[in-house]
Amino acid sequence: MFEVTGSLAIVQPVLTLVGLVVLPLVWTALAAAFARPASRSGRMRLVAYDLVAPIVSNTCAVATLGLAIVLVTQLALLPRGHILVQHVAQLARLGQLDLAFDLALDPRSAVFALVVALVGCASALQTSWSSRSHDGLRHAWTGLVTAGAMLLCLGDGFAPILVSLGLLSIGAWGLAGGGTPGQRTAALAGNVAVLLGFVFLFWSLGGAFGPEGYDPDGAPRFVLVATSSPSNTPEKATLAMTTHAGALVSADDADLPSEPVAAPFAIAVEPGVYTLRVHGGAASGDVVVPRVALVSGRTHVLTPYGPTASLRALDDQFAVPRLAPGGGEATVRAALSGRTINGLRASAIVLLLVLGGALAHLHSLASRRGPSTLVSVLEAVPAPYLAIKLAPLVDPSGPDGALVVLLGAASAALLASRAACVDDGHKALRGVLATASSVAVAAAGLGAPAASLILASSAMVATSAALAAIEARRDARWLGMACAGAVGLLPGAGTSSGYILAVMAALGSAGSGSSGRVVFAGAVVVTLLVACALGALGAFRVYDAIVRASARDPGHSRAQGVLVIVLAVLALVGGVVLGAGTTMFGGHVLPLAGRLVGTGMPPASRAMAAAAVVLSLLAASGGVFLARRVSASSVPPRWLLALGRPYAVLTWTASGIGRGATFLQRSVRAMDRDVIDDVPAAFGELSLRAVARLTRLSRAIAGKVDRPLDRAAGAVVVKLDMDGPRAAERVCTAVLLVMVALLGLVVLSSFLLG
């Protein structure tokens, strides 16, 4: 009898949830429609275009923020365990693959939704109040980025998340004026990696990839979960199904009310033993749930078991134990850790692809050139949000936790070193935000998703305030407050609690385990502190530069100055609220962020908690001290310039790979057009004229190949001081082999890809 007991999420259908995504899309469409035309004729018409786009954008932006506040308040007033959901459309259903376009708002996504709505609204207002001429297209791109980030936070399933990543990439490309090929490649490669990660996650939930292909695990595809919620009618049992919208449920050995019942539903049935049959559609076979008992006065939920494309259903599977093959119970984390793909753990592959692809968006954000609107910070949403969503998959003490920590810490170190040495203020602040988001990914691997939530939300709002302050230049003190909130300089405010909790988790992991684990944890602690210090160095270098610029040319935009103050205050207060109850000295009070993500904190002693507080504050203060030293120097010190070399090597390597891929792609097209399609004709002509043209062909090849080959070999000989005839002959042979290998690689790529 496949009946288990667990704590499932209780859904509350709310149609207005769609408005959080529709409003930014309407904002995008109308702003693009009323963008200033290319024609310069008709001054009144141009003025009308200039006025309509900002009005539409600001109205939709304020409405989106207001609706987000209302829905989050509604969620907060519901009992614990409730979430807001809305089914939008059914995209495809094939077997267990159920691609639905659903929206869901849980406590984790509620915080991100508020931040997205706030930043989008602030960006629309800042664009309208800027000294630049009104640009409808900029408003449209702002709305598209807001819609993509909001859909990422609300999307329940792989389909809406992948669509949201595409919208984010397109919107960021439009705001950057096209961007560089490297940035576009990084964003596209990141989206493809996330897609592959989700594909492997789906199949790994229901089986394993062995030497003979995919082997299903034979577990039931639907189970009946007896929840703790009482039935509305004590003398009857309640049967509910909230996922797989449109699926038909019937009973083989008894009658259900209005059978078959279409999901989602919640009906009262007579107590007894039932054999339930779930019919997904024409492309899906019937799934039988045999011999399950429905008890009077209890609520029973029919939920997917195994492969699922719904993150809400995956959350339920984390809460409900699985049936182990040999009897007993097992968790989803244990099941994924025990399955392999070509000898590698399925969970490691999923985490590497999904989180690695999300981190690619951070590097794309940090490498963009020139000024940017506030909404550009929303490109940092995917990495921390997906890390928090997949945190239940990660065992902090196992290899999966080490993999996630390594990804986040390495990314944070690279981004922080680059942010510390660049002279572009916008790029430096975007690098600081990317650093905090990478630390958030590492914190999720350390078992502290609460730190991830604080770091991501506070850093995005604080960076928005700092970017707005750069343009306003009205009062540099609030720029300093925003920078302090972004790097954790103020105790308990902004990102400070996030850095403290992350360092505390790293110290706690070092307190128990083998010597290798202690060394690894120590390296992680040092990396996180260095990232914090370099982030503070980069942020306060920008602050010092703006202070000097404001003394020469103070800003005159009072409205933008108010916007800076509001965002900076919200960033600081938001960190205080989310970190309220942070156990800085080894207490037992779980911070609000921990209650929102639904997980506790790793155990830590009072000494470790106090050390985390002191170390994080010293690291941020050290970064500020270094910024003061650098700003006071007329010539940048050598160590500052050296900080950019690791990222320069990474950029050079990625650029080389991109150029190689572009070369092969162009070669494939050329070979496909000029060679592959003409292979039969070429062989026929060669067979007919081989004898007549053999001599001429050999002379032509000798004349064309020998000269460039001699020049290449001669250049190598001169550079390497190899004057001997045998050395020159060897170099000539090596150059010839390289040319032949390159030609072979092009031909092979043509046959494989053309």
Image (spheres, rainbow, N blue to C red):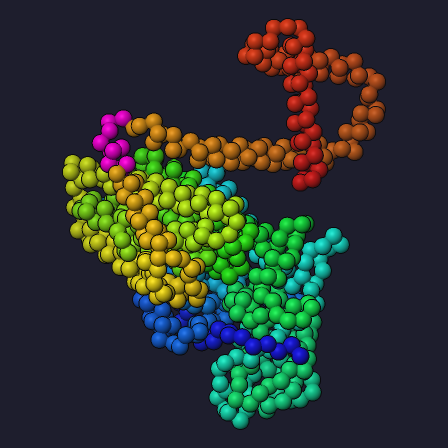
Q: Which residue is drawn at 20% across and 40% down?
A: 547
SS assignment for the magenta stretch, majority: helix
* Camera-side residue of 670 and 471: 471
Q: Is 633 part of what is drawn in magenta?
A: yes
* Camera-side residue of 698 and 373: 373
Question: What x and y, as percent, mark residue 496?
Answer: 31, 53
> Image height check: is 235 above or below 153?
below
Say whether residue 127 is visible: no
Q: Residue at x 17, y 51 (%)?
A: 558
Q: Which residue is drawn at 48% across and 38% down?
A: 182
- Residue 4 location, quadrant: bottom right
Question: What x and y, as percent, mark residue 670?
Answer: 64, 33
Q: Give the side of residue 62 with respect to residue 326, left or right.
A: left
Locate the C terminus and report the quarter of the image it occupies.
top right
Locate the N terminus and report the quarter of the image it occupies.
bottom right
For the magenta stretch, what is the residue range? 626-635
Q: Is 334 part of what is drawn in magenta?
A: no
* Camera-side residue of 676 and 325: 325
- Residue 734 location, quadrant: top right
Question: What x and y, as percent, mark residue 585?
Answer: 32, 58
Q: Give the side of residue 538 with respect to residue 237, left or right.
A: left
Question: What x and y, as percent, mark residue 697?
Answer: 75, 16
Q: Which residue is outermost to the bottom? A: 235
